[in-house]
Amino acid sequence: MAEKKGKGGEVKGVSRYYELGGDSIKSRKPVCPRCGNGVFLANHGDRQSCGKCGYTEFKK
């Protein structure tokens, strides 16, 4: 699967959230434990939160 490059060379689309290695696919961002695969946690300064269900993890 070819990665599409946007302006400035950044990777566009869903492929920027996943890392392909050999026979496995691993997400680059943390996944929400309540919602499951495909729903990622947003990275804020002091916390990570899910925009779908509101789950929040505070950073130490």
Image (tube, grey):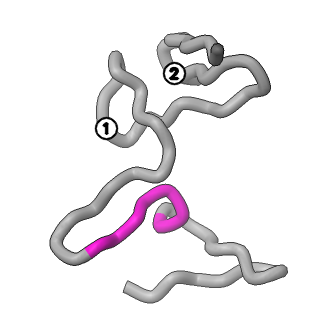
Relative height, residue 13 to residue 32 (above, below): below
Residue lying at 56% horizontally and 12% vertically, measured from the top left = 56
Q: Quadrant location of the N terminus?
A: bottom left
Q: Residues within 10 Å of mark 1 (few under 14, many from 20)?
A: few
Relative height, residue 8 to residue 20 (above, below): below
Relative height, residue 20 to residue 58 (above, below): below
Which amino acid does the dot numbered 2 rest on?
Lys
| Residue where numbered disc 1 is placed | 37
Q: Choose between 17 and 13: the one closer to the eye.
A: 17
Residue at the outermost front position: 60
Residue lying at 34% horizontally and 70% vertically, measured from the top left = 20
Q: Which is more N-terminal, label 1 or label 2?
A: 1
> What x and y, as percent, mark residue 11?
63, 74
Which residues lie in the magenta part?
A: 15-21
* Numbered circle sitting on residue 52: 2
Q: Choose between 19 and 11: the one closer to the eye.
A: 19
> What x and y, as percent, mark residue 28?
47, 52
Residue at the outermost left position: 23
Q: Secondary structure at mark 2?
A: loop
Q: Is residue 43 magenta?
A: no
Relative height, residue 52 to residue 55 (above, below): below
Q: CA distance from mark 2 to mark 1?
A: 13 Å
Which amino acid does the dot numbered 1 rest on?
Asn
Residue lying at 74% horizontally and 82% vertically, measured from the top left = 9
Figure disc tally = 2
Q: Secondary structure at mark 1?
A: loop
What is the quadrant of residue 45 in the picture?
top right
Left or right: 32, with 44 as reference point: left
Residue at the outermost bottom position: 2
Q: Residues within 10 Å of mark 2 (few under 14, many from 20)?
A: few
